[in-house]
Amino acid sequence: MSSAKLDSCLNEWRSAIGDTFVRTEPAILERAETATYKTAQRIPAVLSPATRSEVQQCLHIANKYGVPVYPISSGKNWGYGSRVPPGDGSALIDLGRLDKIVEFSEELGYVTVEPGVTQKQLYSFLRQKGSRLWMDATGSSPQCSLIGNTMERGFGHTPMGDHFAHVCGLEVVLPDGTVVETGAARLPGSLTASVNRWGVGPSIDGLFSQSNLGIVTRMTIWLMPEPDAFEAFFFRCPDHASLPELIDVIRDLRLREILRSSIHIGNDYKVLAGLQPYPWNKTDGKTPLGPELMAKFRSKLGFGSWNASGGLYGTKAQVNEAKGILRKTFAKQSGTLKFLSPKTLRLAKKFAHPFRMLTGWDLNKTVELVEPVLGLMQGVPTEQPLKSAYWRKRFEAPAEMDPDRDRCGLLWYAPVAPALGHSVEALTDLTSNILLRFGFEPMISLTFLTARLISCVVSISYDRDVPGEDETAAACHDELVRACSERGYYPYRLGIKSMNQITEREEYADLLGRLKTALDPQGILAPGRYDPRGSAVSDPILERS
Amino acid sequence: MSSAKLDSCLNEWRSAIGDTFVRTEPAILERAETATYKTAQRIPAVLSPATRSEVQQCLHIANKYGVPVYPISSGKNWGYGSRVPPGDGSALIDLGRLDKIVEFSEELGYVTVEPGVTQKQLYSFLRQKGSRLWMDATGSSPQCSLIGNTMERGFGHTPMGDHFAHVCGLEVVLPDGTVVETGAARLPGSLTASVNRWGVGPSIDGLFSQSNLGIVTRMTIWLMPEPDAFEAFFFRCPDHASLPELIDVIRDLRLREILRSSIHIGNDYKVLAGLQPYPWNKTDGKTPLGPELMAKFRSKLGFGSWNASGGLYGTKAQVNEAKGILRKTFAKQSGTLKFLSPKTLRLAKKFAHPFRMLTGWDLNKTVELVEPVLGLMQGVPTEQPLKSAYWRKRFEAPAEMDPDRDRCGLLWYAPVAPALGHSVEALTDLTSNILLRFGFEPMISLTFLTARLISCVVSISYDRDVPGEDETAAACHDELVRACSERGYYPYRLGIKSMNQITEREEYADLLGRLKTALDPQGILAPGRYDPRGSAVSDPILERS
């Protein structure tokens, strides 16, 4: 791309949305180019349109000059690439200023939001309204965009954990600047725009998730009524070998709808990283933390090799029935089952000793993790899980965490498996071994996305300030991709690093190519995003002056 | 289209799939051109490929000669057009010979089927296997194709009532003959092809429902485990005015997941037509059946102005808890609540008199309707609802029902409304008045497709052998489309008659046009199907010799 062409494009963007909202200062660009792992992509500008109409104009101008753009909602895509585009030379379109809650219905249980609306914003909105509705929150930051997370098909902790399955009525700016509404919203005056997922005719919502086919500028999310009763269960397995049985048991409970929410299972490394930073003093400053030492932490802090948790929702009687069934079911498993309600937690914090005497659960040691998890199950966003991004840092996580700025090393890979014990075990063994081999702690969380499907999120957590670690982490990631794909374990979501590493069938790639060409003939929208063909930009971007 | 061109095309189809599977005999074509209402479209041939590869060849040849084709699975699209294509001159591709159950998992609860697999076939398969899994069945014929119904986004009666929300891993033959698999199935060797709805990257399944963008030749459907306990509730409202409250109450129960399945509410006309043919003797042979006479039938046969029913699924305690909540909730409504389990039904049939004395429910009068409904709630397909297609005929429904052949008049229109009492009432009033005005009985069923959305299926039921009725029914249908659309009530699904009657926003139509051109540049696949631009074929088909 010629400098003159880019300059003309920038000038036109400035006239369209205002000088102050087209940033090209090196410091700003460098921050936008910084993820939690090494990336080489350069960003020529950061645009911050304020309205849908300004987004449209940005796209018209991008098409006119052939300058690619990459939209971000809140840019909190940590572990998967943060704000960095998969292709080189894309200007960022930061949608953070489109932050309105457009519509809300207490009766029908939904809210319509723009891409800048964060988890925290919706949570506060519902509290201020005195609403009896709960949102579903992810374990990502409270500052995370609802649309951004949903379009990446992120997940949470309540019965509405599979976000993309509970949204409808998208407003999408297509790459050429045209605006369409999807589902029933496509029909003039439709009364069901916010409650009708399919509309009539082909359903196209899926096209705009994990794709580069349009910019979602509005979305309706469904909310659940606060249940009469809520309680959580926590089950810890003493040994790794119990995992297959645990998976099979929970699958059965999910299929029977005794459990109705996303169930999460963390391994020991995942739990420890949630509780404290890397124990440098106990390891003589060496990494990785080996299995023997981990066994000591398990016994000292009272968690298991695998730790399952999930919410029970319903009437008092329904929750009690579920508790009874869980007790009966888990009695056959080796491990410990505990229940916890928000009320019990308050009491346990106040009267820690008697609680421990009564229940045998030394909650104090893990309360820092248990409390936010209990909140997530009730749709309360939390910053707590983000702390583990600082696992290998030599300083404490600051009050205002920013893993990009603080050079936290974090690479996530999230292969999925059918909810069959032996298959999940093979995947966790495979990924654990790879991580340990490369010198990283195998932090793994398993989530029942549905009764039938488990997402295995593997974190490569390291310190970018340690020389050579960026390269080792990248090699470890690539080996994960290779080894998992070879065995048929593909991810539910991709980071920008793996978007050109998944080989797919030629016919399918060709079909996606045809769709892309039909909607974005110049290929200006998010080249390379979930689209291996576009991940390299032919003209190198000009060197920054 | 020239006769010579069509002849060459037919010859090539014959070489590809065999002479006997390319039918052009006038009697066969005329039957295929016959729906349950007047249609003018002509069909030049009926092709019956046996395999996916033969489907591909049929499409290659269709493209070569520019002859349009229209796929049907079982063709039981009664009330919406049966086997008749929306556009003129399309050869039928009857997929009935692709009738294999390809894969089945008792553990993960799914089955993979081809388009010729019917409800009855799957039901028998599960029984033969001794499976503990239940399918979801629609009230359509047992001979109805699972893929056909799901791609039309049909619905049933269990917690898996929204069919399209419980399928994945489509195999699709694109209009140019290319085959793709969707979701996780697109990735080589994926272990989650049958359990992973979204796969990775854009989700394209929705493109192939209610569309003309591809032929689905394989699909995985999820099944539910048979619950420990099952019971049904039946609630009848004495008067029409109770509807809004009933809707609001059930919405609340659905949102709270006290009720977890599709809930159906039929009006008095709908129930009567399910029980008996038109009472010619009571009306002096006149139509329509007026509200006064209907009131007499209600009191004689013991049903309400509105009649809700739904299944309760779970453990014994869960079902009892739901019953308790329903009792408490409906105690505030005017109307009668009854519960019925399969066991109670057996007893009630055997000991009708004591049952009536004990419960006050004269079940015998409605058992013909109640029994199949109870079956549907347990995933048992039934022919019973089809009987009502013979409502206005002067003869009894035959043992082997075929509404096309028997010149039953049936036109369905299915507008949806948000699950708000006042909105649903406005819609049922509107549609009832239109039907009565045109001289038809307003048979209406309301279904909670989800907690938030209600489908209102309005049947125009008549006798095609009565001169002028075809025309009156068509006018009534068109008035329904006009009046409902004007007020924002759009359908969940379209019949071939209304596919060019729904006006949509230009930008959206243009987007669909771009997608169609990208996948089907010659427009040979199902022109006009959910696609107003393609509903007329430019060259008239040759007159049949």
Image (spheres, coloured by chain):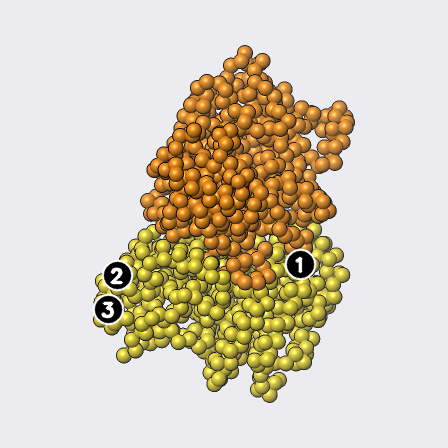
Chain colours: A orange, B yellow
Direction from residue A128 to residue B165 in the image, left or right: left
- At numbered mark 2, what does the secondary structure look like: helix, strand or loop? helix
Indicate the amino acid at tag 3. Answer: Lys
Query: Are labels 1 and 2 on one chain?
Result: yes
Q: In the picture shown, does residue B72 fall above or below A469?
A: below
The x and y percentages for residue B366 are: 62, 70
For disc 3, the chain is B
Indicate the amino acid at tag 2. Answer: Lys
Q: Which residue is located at x 51 percent, y 21 percent?
A: A463
Question: In which quadrant will I find the C terminus of chain B?
Answer: bottom left
Q: Nearer the viewer, residue B245 or A59?
A: A59
Q: Which residue is located at x 53 percent, y 51 percent?
A: A53
- Say few, some or many: other residues with alpha carbon within 10 Å of mark 3 (under 14 / 14 to 19 / 20 or more): few
Q: Nearer the viewer, residue B18 or B321?
A: B18
Query: Are labels 1 and 3 on one chain?
Result: yes
Indicate the amino acid at tag 1. Answer: Ile
Q: In the picture shown, does residue B510 fall above or below A312?
A: below
| Residue where numbered disc 1 is placed | B250
Instruction: Kindly give the residue lying farthest to the top in the view shown.
Output: A284
| Residue where numbered disc 3 is placed | B5
